[in-house]
């Protein structure tokens, strides 16, 4: 009887240990040293780099196109996110890039100098795109 009770307790403990081990197993380590969990999709550094690359390219295109540049300046000044999205869509961002993205429009900077637009993006959860309008302050 004592032996039967011991074997039942032992088998229950073994079952609990087997159930607990997968839940506490370490995350898989990628070649870049980044840990990714075993479940679901997790954004990668490549996703973040791709989004930032699009932001940099869009910024260059917008600087080269006076109409888009003026529209984006106006969107930032009046805090019109929908107008900013339209400009971003015309300059390299996709609807998927902008879907569920938090778009922040900021103004600021010094006095005098040249109006500048800077676009930065961070990925993911939450995905953020920041458009900063600033005036460089030149002092000599």
Image: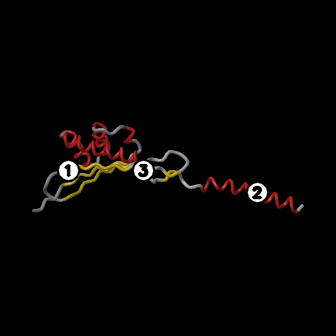
Label 1 CA crowd tier, 10 Å (few <14, some 14–19, many 20+): some
- Residues at marks 2 and 1 touching, judged by CB atoms closer than 8 Å: no
Of the image marks 2 and 1, the number of the one nearer the N terminus: 2
Say above or below: 93 vs 135.
above
Of the image marks 3 and 1, the number of the one nearer the N terminus: 1
Q: Nearer the viewer, residue 127 or 41?
A: 41
Label 3 CA crowd tier, 10 Å (few <14, some 14–19, many 20+): few
x and y percentages locating residue 11 in the rendered image: 77, 56
Which residue matches tag 2? 12
- What residue is shown at x 76% (from left), y 57% (from top)? 12
Q: Residue furthest right?
A: 1
Q: Which mark is residue 126?
A: 3
3 vs 2, front mark:
2
x and y percentages locating residue 101 in the rendered image: 39, 46
Q: Nearer the viewer, residue 123 or 100?
A: 123
- What residue is shown at x 38% (from left), y 41% (from top)? 97
Of the image marks 3 and 2, the number of the one nearer the N terminus: 2
Q: How many marks?
A: 3
Which residue matches tag 1? 116
- What residue is shown at x 73% (from left), y 56% (from top)? 14
Coloration of the structure image: secondary structure
Kindly indicate the quadrant of the structure image that contains residue 68.
Answer: top left
The Cα atoms of the two marked residues, 3 and 2, are separated by 42 Å
Q: Nearer the viewer, residue 17 or 126?
A: 17
Q: Residue furthest left?
A: 140
């Amino acid at each position: 009887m004592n032996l039967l009770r011991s074997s039942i307790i032992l088998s229950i403990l073994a079952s609990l240990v087997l159930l607990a081990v997968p839940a506490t197993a370490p995350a898989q380590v990628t070649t870049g040293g980044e840990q990714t969990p075993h479940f679901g999709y997790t954004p990668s550094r490549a996703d973040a780099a791709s989004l930032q690359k699009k932001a940099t390219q869009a910024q260059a295109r917008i600087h080269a196109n006076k109409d888009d540049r003026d529209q984006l300046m106006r969107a930032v000044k009046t805090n019109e996110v929908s107008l900013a999205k339209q400009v971003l869509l015309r300059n390299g961002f996709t609807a998927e890039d902008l879907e569920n993205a938090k778009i922040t429009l900021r103004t600021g900077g010094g006095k005098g100098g040249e109006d500048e637009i800077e676009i930065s993006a961070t990925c993911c959860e939450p995905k953020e795109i920041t458009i900063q309008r600033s005036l460089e302050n030149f002092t000599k």
